[in-house]
Image (cartoon, rainbow, N blue to C red):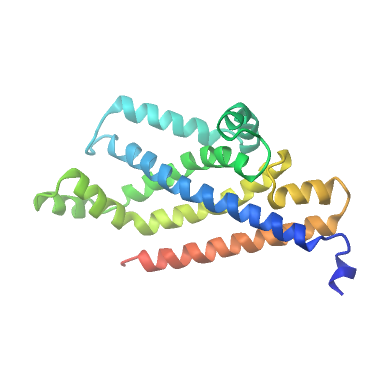
Amino acid sequence: MVNNLLPNVNWESMWEASLETVYMSILAVAVTFILGIILGLLLYLTDKGNFWENKAIHAVTASVVNIFRSIPFIILLILLIPFTNLIVGTMLGPSAALPALIIGAAPFYARLVEIGLREVDKGVIEAAQSMGAGQWSIIMKVLLPESMPALISGITVTGITLVSYTAMAGAIGAGGLGDLAYREGFQRSQPDVTFVATVAVLIIVFIFQTIGDWITYKTDKR
């Protein structure tokens, strides 16, 4: 019955492409989470009135974040081909998509981190300072834990964006469901392949969202 409705779908290839998409998404999310928090902390802490107030560093960091956040991902992929070839050795395959995925998503997530940190109650920070807590102690034991629900919610949104980025990366040979939908579905006029690949992407997005919502709920102390 299924084979009659979807005659062109190779389920083994579809499963392999799905695993490639999950591989790219999970690795990119993990690295983006770390880099985004570092950049977000730098944006927040060097801003006016915060621990490391420094106009020059804040301006440079904000400029870098804004520039890379504004470049359309498909253009970023092309711009980073020399860099990708340098560090990965090829511009084809799932691993080759990772530099562009991370560089494209980390600045976006950094802004979400900065927003999450700004939402932390100043009174909690002042209370920690009054008890003699140092800057690093406040960052690690107050700022990050208090903003964790917002940080998890932000990385969930970013993760879903990364799944869509992997589909675009597939258009230039990065593998995954985007590559399968474009190469087997579009170029060979097999709409059933494109349809199943789209459903698979939606399932991955749904799983990401469900896990992110659950972790956000568990970390929210309110």
Q: Position of residue 100 (x, y in %)?
A: 57, 37
Which residue is found at the position 19% from the left and 44% from the top? 135
Q: Which of 221/20 is in front?
A: 20
Looking at the image, which residue sits at the far bottom?
1
Which residue is found at the position 53% from the left and 47% from the top? 28
Q: Is residue 12 left or right of residue 40?
A: right
Q: Which of 18/45 is in front?
A: 18
Which residue is found at the position 60% from the left and 55% from the top? 22
Locate the N terminus by quadrant. bottom right
Q: Is residue 191 left or right of residue 41?
A: right
Q: Which of 195/87 is in front?
A: 87
Q: Position of residue 213 (x, y in %)?
A: 47, 65
Residue 20, compared with residue 218, is above or below; it is: above
Q: Position of residue 9 (x, y in %)?
A: 83, 61
Residue 206, compared with residue 139, is above or below; it is: below
Locate the C terminus by quadrant. bottom left
